[in-house]
Amino acid sequence: MTAPGASATEVPALTPWRIADIAAALLALDGASIGGVSLRAPAGPVRVAWLARLSALRGGAPCSRMPAGIGDARLLGGLDLTATLAMGRPVAERGLLAEADGGVLIVAMAERVEAATAAKLCSVLDAGAVTVERDGIALTIPTRFAIVALDEGIAADERPAAALTDRLALRLDLTALSHREIEPPVFDAESLAAARGRVAATIDDETIACLCTAALALGIGSTRTALQAVKVARLVAALAGREAVAPEDAALAAALVLAPRATQLPAPSEEAQESEPEPDSQPQSPPSESDEQAAAPPCDLDEMVLDAAKAAIPAGLLAQLLAAGGRTRARAAGRAGQLQKAARRGRVVGSKAGDLRGDARLDVVETLRAAAPWQRLRRSEAAMAGRNGLIVRREDFRIARYKQRSETATLFVVDASGSSALQRLAEAKGAVRLLLAECYVRRDEVALIAFRKAQAEIVLPPTRSLVAAERALAGLPGGGATPLATAIEAACALADAVRRKGRTPALVFMTDGRANIDRAGRQGRAQAQTDALAAARGLRGEGFNAILIDTSPQPQPQAADIAAAMGGLYLPLPQADAAGVGRAVGLALAAGR
């Protein structure tokens, strides 16, 4: 793998595209043995050219593609129940990972792959097989493939799952590469075909120790990375036509595998520090070429491997390492993608005709009922083929249906204006405490928005904590004007944020409906009432479940109009206490579910 004319003890400087070209050749040679490559590059001519180079090195064989948001049924496969019943033995339905056996799987938008999907990919890479289980029957399908994880993240912290990239030996960053820097190919399909007979190139213990030492010097604590470097060194030797790993092969493997994972700069050796010349006032004559050759020390494999890895560290990363004192801290995995949908949760509410895909559960009783009327006809057909017994076909399958209650967040919007604010706040505080006690059973949340003067304030974000509720409600002030339109808009925004998190918001307004502050913060009952009605109609357009509790001494028509505009339930409870408010809200929410 050395450049023409380069000595066997030195690794020539490689351009970013040349490194990418070598990575494509390694994947085409035996990508399954090294896991694959994490390719950070935006969609464009550079990435297209690299993928085309990979396809050409594989003899034009197409690569499998894993789309974003793929389901488990398509990814892993499952049990083909129809074929199993017909054959009398378990028959597997091949998924995408089984279909990729012996090839390359391209994972699009790898930075957005859910943690559960990434875990399944890691499990298959580790085991070399896909294991699927349904209704007590387990099937194992052997499969070996390489992964090309396309990292299209824009921000620096947008990266694929660390567990997945840790299993991919190679990492490429082509974000700063222009299409003008694409170089002619060095390898072709014929040269790779000749190299496949030398994939099992031998490597001695000294070279393995040097790669492990270099990994530790660069701050890489994973033993998997050192093992990947050993495998890459053997593939590099096969590409170069060698039966055994040479020092330059190990150096190139360190540059490909270890350098992109470096978290610290290697400390200078003691010999290098002792060999630094001391300042001398007497000028010295430059040594001759013969003197340099005579004084040149023999090549040290440890230093050669470490220098190659250090030279391959990107300049930007090197500057960050220096600024951070030689160490960087790994970014913690975010919460995005950690929530999974449960397909078998909730109460069974019947069945429907369908196919057994994903986590669908077969309703055995209903399936047998659907197949029973056809047994006489099917048995007469089966008798001609010499088969007997119960005959169930795909069109008989009935899938159990579940009704799953989603988590609810009750948002209290309390009018804290006027002389009776303290009474309304006391009622709201008691209702919140009563509902919080039920949240531990129903897994609901409670939030509180108070509005007075010219603004609406979220005094209690959605929470299940009674301590947080007490702390937020303890010092809540009262008095002032009634900015009802602003309060409705703030409640709508908070409800939308709750809905985006997968919860069902329910809004409870506690007000007399007599607005006197408009959207612009100006006083005036007519315009304030118009703005409040407009905001209520906007809330209705969002489809939120709303309740308006009229807390005035006598029922107010303005409050009824606001409730009708938002499409909510109107409850005139002028004399209700906290328990009454809690009971009314509970009944209204139960009716709305």
Image (cartoon, helix red, strand yellow):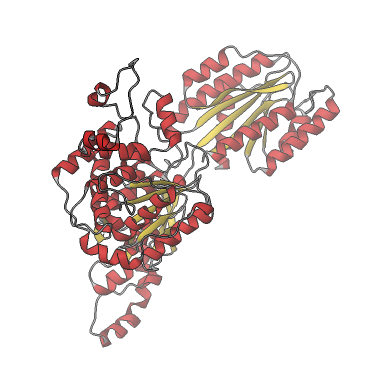
Q: Nearer the viewer, residue 49 or 90?
A: 49
**Where is residue 99 drawn, in percent x and y?**
34, 64
Q: Is residue 151 visible?
A: yes
**Where is residue 91 drawn, in percent x and y?**
27, 68
Quadrant where the image shows the C terminus = top right
| Residue farthest to the left, as pictured | 205
Judged left or right of residue 13, residue 235 is: left
**Where is residue 545 drawn, in percent x and y?**
62, 39
Residue 515 against residue 37 in the figure, above or below: above
Q: Nearer the viewer, residue 113 or 492?
A: 113
Residue 59 against residue 206 in the figure, above or below: below
Q: Nearer the viewer, residue 13 or 589?
A: 13
Residue 449 against residue 542 in the figure, above or below: above
Q: Is residue 131 visible?
A: no
**Where is residue 429 drawn, in percent x and y?**
57, 19
| Residue farthest to the bottom, as pictured | 384
Residue for point 85% across, 24% down = 524
Residue for point 39% across, 44% down = 115
| Tally of marks | 0
Judged left or right of residue 420, residue 222 is: left
Q: Nearer the viewer, residue 189 or 477?
A: 189
Residue 285 against residue 365 in the figure, above or below: above
Judged left or right of residue 516, residue 468 is: left
Residue for point 40% across, 26% down = 322
